[in-house]
Image (cartoon, rainbow, N blue to C red):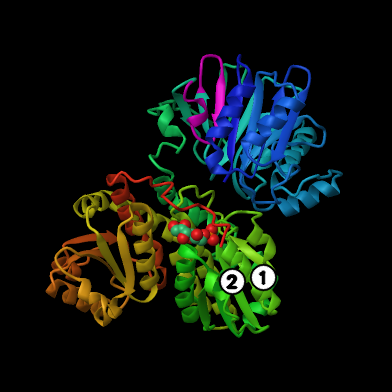
Amino acid sequence: MCGIVGYIGHREAYPIILQGLQRLEYRGYDSAGIALYDGDHLKVCKTKGKVEDLKNRLESEISTKGTIGIGHTRWATHGVPNDINSHPHISNSGNLVIIHNGIIENYDPLRQELINRGYSFQSDTDTEVLVNLIEDVKSKENVKLGKAVQIALNQTIGAYAIAVFDKTKPNEIVVARLGSPLAIGVGDDEFFIASDATPFIEYTNNAIYLEDGEMAVVRNHKELEIRKIKDDSLVDPYIQELQLNLEQIEKGGYDHFMIKEIYEQPDAITDTFRGRMKTKEGIIRMAGIDDNIDKFLNARRIVVVACGTSWHAGLVAEYIFEEFARIPVEVEYASEFRYRNPVIYEDDVVIAISQSGETADTMAAIKLAKEKGAFVFGVCNVVGSSISRETHAGAYTHAGPEIGVASTKAFTTQITILTLIALKLAKLKGKLSLTEFRTYLQELESIPAKVAEALKSNEQAIRVAAQYKDVANALYLGRGYNFPVALEGALKLKEISYIHAEGYPAAEMKHGPIALIDEEMPVVVIATRQGHYEKVVSNIEEIKARSGKIIGIVSKGDTEVKKLADHVIEIPETLEPFTPLLTTIPLQLLSYHIAVMLGKNVDQPRNLAKSVTVE
Ligand code: F6R
């Protein structure tokens, strides 16, 4: 995920773009850059680091004059975060300049073709390929910039929101979108371009949100033309009146980053799949696995090391790996593993899971596993993070920046990527037929839409939250794949509302925790139809018999649990191994709303930090 901003009009572009980048920094903050045209020269300044670093550098290095410009804040996908890979990127002639949010999946063959035609590249990015492809088309076909962008985009596979201009014709900016958001602010004789409307809200509240597959040329401060990229047909601009105020916008219109990130999960999971899952062909492609496939296929065991929510994702993975790939799995707290001289074999594969890629205990566990000769694979969200560099190979979750301290979309995307790995290994090991494999892939593909449906339980979560916000304790129960979800649900409640909560495997309750149950105790029970349903129903009966309050997380259309529970929250049906991706959604919503009702600092809970770089 990246943030893009552009301006063309009668004002100085620099302050508008700089402020826009600050507002979009939630979308990515590993590097930033700006391009301005001052009437004579194209000036580009970019740097690894935050927008603040860019500001310091830019104001000392270049003049900030100019009424046309573009800016970018980056969440690296292709190429490590450094000055060269930062956007904007310039074409070989030095005339075209581009910013891009997304991934051009077929950039490699396009790059090769351009190299054969004499082009050279400075960065590792797909974006530099795109700007040169546009330039190549423009000169080869002798067409205007807009047409060149359109022809070039029709040769690409992937996702993009782009803004590009030509310094030899600095009266227009061409923008386009497919899969990444792009808004155009329509002012008086001026246009604003951005990933969302936050950068221009104080200048205009008239905005056009481009649809997927559309491009626009904004010209001469007044003219605007929208077309379909595929067939060149003209589109009538639909100008919306924005209902935003300045206070809301830093969280993209949400009250907190946490709720925004909860709602981002359908897109985040889709981004995790992107370019990896080919359902029709029955293929899962992941370079980090493909390049080391023998290590995985010959693994004696998989040992997962992680902390907190990432450890919970590892526990879900244990069920999934053992079920599908039939490889024994152990899941270790990194903080315990690192200090207990664990038995590690050279043919073990150690998987380190970490959203931030900076967690000190996980880092130390990786070093120890490497010393003992194991192959270490990282599952991280933050591109270029320490853990992603320290591991032998890895896969990014591509969930986009997670700013709320309580992990939400990181958890579901970690489970997603670990599921892809397990399914891939299962197929290669002959544990799943091609038909079975395809069935699982098809179902996985439907998960983002089902997560979106599960998010509709928000209103119910609010009602349940209002009733239980003042309790002192809560229990979370689940079995099988949903036992780790019970742990995660309890952690979410604890960390942001400071209510004591415990997660248990449902059947363990009678070995002790049942003593806690009385009419004051809410018990959240995950009781989907697919997983040990009758057993869980019996556990619910046991709680009911002791006057506990039941909040059931059930499959759509459930009748049995409904009869027993005080409240039920429904989620869509899916195959049992994928239920954690759905059951976790109402639990996130429930803890969020309880914390908000209690007036807690949801995004920055006391005593916590987003990335735990100390032991
Ligand atoms: C809980 C939470 C933490 C992290 C843990 C590991 O919501 O965010 O428990 O999961 O600190 O962090 P990462 O995944 O960055 O290694």
Q: Is residue 538 above or below residue 460?
A: below
Residue at the disc numbered 2: 351
> Which amino acid type is shown beneath numbered disc 1?
Lys
Along the viewing direction, whichever of 70 and 133 lies nearer the viewer: 70
Residue at position x 79%, y 33% from top?
139
Earlier sequence position, callout 2 versus callout 1: 2
x, y percent for residue 180: 54, 43
x, y percent for residue 550: 20, 65
Residue at position x 67%, y 36% from top?
53
- Quadrant housing residue 154: top right
Along the viewing direction, whichever of 544 and 457 lies nearer the viewer: 544
In the rendered structure, which segment of residues is drawn in magenta?
186-202
Residue at the disc numbered 1: 367
Classify 10 Å Cα crowding around label 1: few (below 14), some (14-19), many (20 and above): some
- Could you tell whether 33 is left or right of 589 in the image? right
* Pointer 2 residue Cβ closer than 8 Å to ligand 1: no
x, y percent for residue 170: 70, 21
x, y percent for residue 386: 65, 58
Classify 10 Å Cα crowding around label 2: few (below 14), some (14-19), many (20 and above): many
Q: Is residue 229 visible?
A: no
Residue at position x 43%, y 54% from top?
406
